[in-house]
Image (cartoon, rainbow, N blue to C red):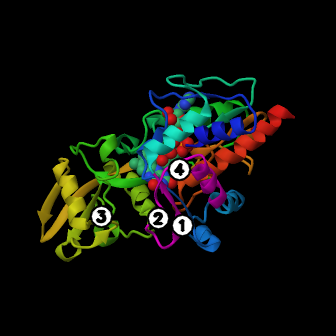
Amino acid sequence: MAGLVAAVRARELGADVVVHEKGSRPGGSMLLSGGFVFRYREWGRFREECPGGDPELQRLVWERLDDALAWLESLGAPVAERETGNPLTTGLRFDNPGLVDVLVRRAGDVRLESPLVALREEPLILATGGFQGDRELVREHVTPEADTLVLRSNPWSTGDGLRLGLAAGARTSEGLDEFWGRAMPAPPAWITEETFRPLSQTYGRFARITNQHEEVYEARTWSEIDVAQWIARQPRGRAWFAVPDDALGERVRDRTVREIVESARAAGGPVERLDGETVVEVVAGITTTLGGLAVDTRGRVADGIWAAGADAGGISLGGWASALASALVLGLAAAEDAAGAVSA
Ligand SMILES: Cc1cc2nc3c(=O)[nH]c(=O)nc-3n(C[C@H](O)[C@H](O)[C@H](O)COP(=O)(O)OP(=O)(O)OC[C@H]3O[C@@H](n4cnc5c(N)ncnc54)[C@H](O)[C@@H]3O)c2cc1C
């Protein structure tokens, strides 16, 4: 998201831009996402939900998002829904393939399978999507149970931006141990990019959540980001969701808990009846890391280097706020500053 946005904006401002894309297709995790680009309706609520994040960066995202969404729409990005379905938030849901298509066409020179592996002389915006795809970095910063995590993201975000930024003298942000993710059915469940979203087990608030020592955890956020982070740190990276029969009819967005449980069963996940409850064994899916390089409100990390998207850490910490929103706003801010640096 952030790289394409930055390229489009920098070109609008007259810069010559090359987008180096490591993957075999453009769009990164944005293409796989739910497409919800949102902010909390109330500034105070944003702070309450994500108390660990940098307030200045949060303020930037919160204040600029509505204009940034209007800018995306003005480019022709197709909107799928004008509501987020969550009374706490406001934003748009984009049709992802259409959004990627619009951005790629306007970004100009997008080179696929062209990973950036070294620093360059020209202004450089790092937007490699975080480090969730690198098992060793995840083990070092997030959890010793890294091997048990399901990668719920594009496969190419392996911390290249973090490494390049640090090599250029950048600092790390707070929250390197935090990530956004979902509870997913444990092995042998068959999980693919297409089933990242439908197989997400998003009913922790209706379940009794335990680890293998029978220690109980209670979901404390609407997004259940805390549940995924807790599971990731349990012995063998495992937890069990025990759902009483009377909770199976509860709704989570457009599905019942029963339907979500059945999706886990159908994928081959461990689901059983025990003591009159339906019990689903889960692991944590890691979608995006939330700590990264420390940026200022122009996205700067070092001389001539900017970062945006998940490479720019420290915005939604302690809870969940739209990573697509941060990627969009920081992508624009970085491009504007970098384009100014080119023309100055
Ligand atoms: C299933 C799923 C659902 C989601 N739903 C939502 C949602 O509804 N709302 C929301 O806000 N967020 C959501 N997210 C998270 C969101 O998609 C990501 O956090 C967001 O795309 C991050 O933007 P980014 O630009 O940092 O990374 P990406 O969009 O992943 O882009 C990073 C790009 O960098 C490329 N890259 C990596 N290394 C290099 C290198 N060395 N050189 C060149 N290119 C490189 C990658 O291939 C990738 O294309 C979801 C994610 C997933 C997977």
Q: Report how far apart the C-alphas of labels 2 and 3 lie in the structure.
A: 30 Å
Query: Over which residues does the magenta segment extend?
Result: 66-94
Q: Earlier in the sequence, mark 1 or mark 4?
A: 1
Front-lying residue, 126 or 72: 72
Name the disc covering residue 84, or none: 2
Q: Report how far apart the C-alphas of labels 4 and 3 lie in the structure.
A: 22 Å
Q: Is residue 256 left or right of residue 146?
A: left
Q: Amino acid at mark 3?
A: Thr
Q: Nearer the viewer, mark 4 or mark 2?
A: 2
**Marks 3 and 1 close (CB-CB < 8 Å):** no
User: Is 30 placed above or below 38 here?
Assistant: above
Q: Earlier in the sequence, mark 4 or mark 3?
A: 4
Q: Would you name the residue on which mark 3 appears?
A: 210
Q: Earlier in the sequence, mark 4 or mark 2?
A: 2
Residue 51 drawn at (x, y percent): 60, 66
Which quarter of the figure is the N terminus placed in? top right
